[in-house]
């Protein structure tokens, strides 16, 4: 589910994704992502991004990760068909793992880029990369990467191919360092 609203000086988005996989002879896999974002547009293509994201992921043993981010960014390219922005700032990471009653909290920097080609006829593509070097945990670095491609079909239907990759060089409790998802979506959009 994706929702968004754009005004003259700001825009906001909300997203919810849930993936479940049940297969014979393996543990069920569940992943839930949410994102609530607000971007305030400033003169000369600068902007202030604010967001709260959550992740629950059985593959990385994450019961719940909540990341609150605030930063400052600049659009390098921005017109009616594309944008490319870069941003950096601070994030607060609050994590709880499945096999631990203890909550882990850390302060991180974030460095990110978002490139989006849209209004190219029926095709669009968006790529986001964010790196989170930790300030409070020695030598810990996390990375989130998203790639979405979408093709519009008649009657407001669409097909979408997505790739998500998460990496953590110091996961807790011996969990996996990385996780990835390939996803194919057939959907309908309400304009």
Image (cartoon, rainbow, N blue to C red):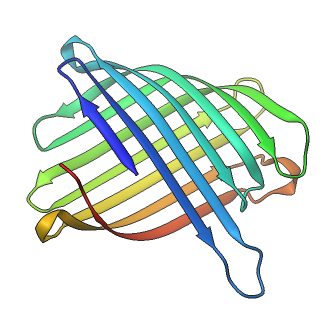
Can you give x and y, in whole percent of width and height, for residue 151 in the image? 21, 66
Can you give x and y, in whole percent of width and height, for residue 82 in the image? 18, 43
Q: Is 121 on the left or on the right of 189, as rendered? A: left
Q: Furthest-bottom residue in view?
A: 24
Looking at the image, is 143 positioned above or below residue 124? above
Q: Is 7 on the left or on the right of 165, as rendered? A: left
Residue drawn at x 12%, y 51% is 119
Identify the image quadrant of residue 140: top right
Can you give x and y, in whole percent of width and height, for residue 118 in the image? 18, 50
Looking at the image, is 119 positioned above or below residue 39? below
Identify the image quadrant of residue 6: top left
Residue drawn at x 65%, y 35% is 66
Residue drawn at x 46%, y 34% is 36
Q: Furthest-front residue in view?
A: 190
Number of numbered tags placed on the structure image: 0
Front-most of residues 99 and 93: 99
Front-most of residues 190 and 73: 190
Residue drawn at x 84%, y 34% is 103
Front-most of residues 88 and 59: 59
Q: Is 41 on the left or on the right of 82, as rendered? A: right
Front-most of residues 70 and 188: 188
């Amino acid at each position: 589910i994706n929702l968004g609203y754009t005004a003259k000086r700001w825009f906001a988005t909300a997203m919810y994704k849930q993936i479940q996989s049940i297969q014979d002879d393996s543990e069920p896999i569940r992943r839930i992502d949410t994102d609530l974002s607000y971007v305030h547009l400033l003169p000369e293509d600068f902007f202030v991004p604010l967001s709260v994201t959550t992740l629950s992921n059985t593959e990385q043993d994450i019961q719940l990760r909540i990341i609150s981010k605030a930063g400052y960014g600049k659009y390098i390219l921005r017109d009616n068909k594309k944008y490319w922005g870069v941003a950096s700032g601070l994030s607060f990471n609050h994590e709880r793992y499945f096999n631990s009653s203890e909550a882990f909290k850390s302060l991180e920097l974030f460095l990110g880029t978002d490139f989006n080609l849209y209004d190219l006829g029926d095709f669009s593509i968006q790529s986001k990369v964010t790196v989170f070097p930790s300030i409070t945990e020695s030598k810990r670095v996390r990375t989130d990467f998203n790639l979405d491609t979408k093709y519009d079909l008649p009657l407001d239907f669409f097909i979408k191919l997505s790739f998500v990759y998460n990496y953590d060089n110091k996961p807790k409790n011996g969990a996996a360092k990385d996780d990835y998802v390939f996803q194919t979506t057939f959907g309908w959009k309400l304009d």
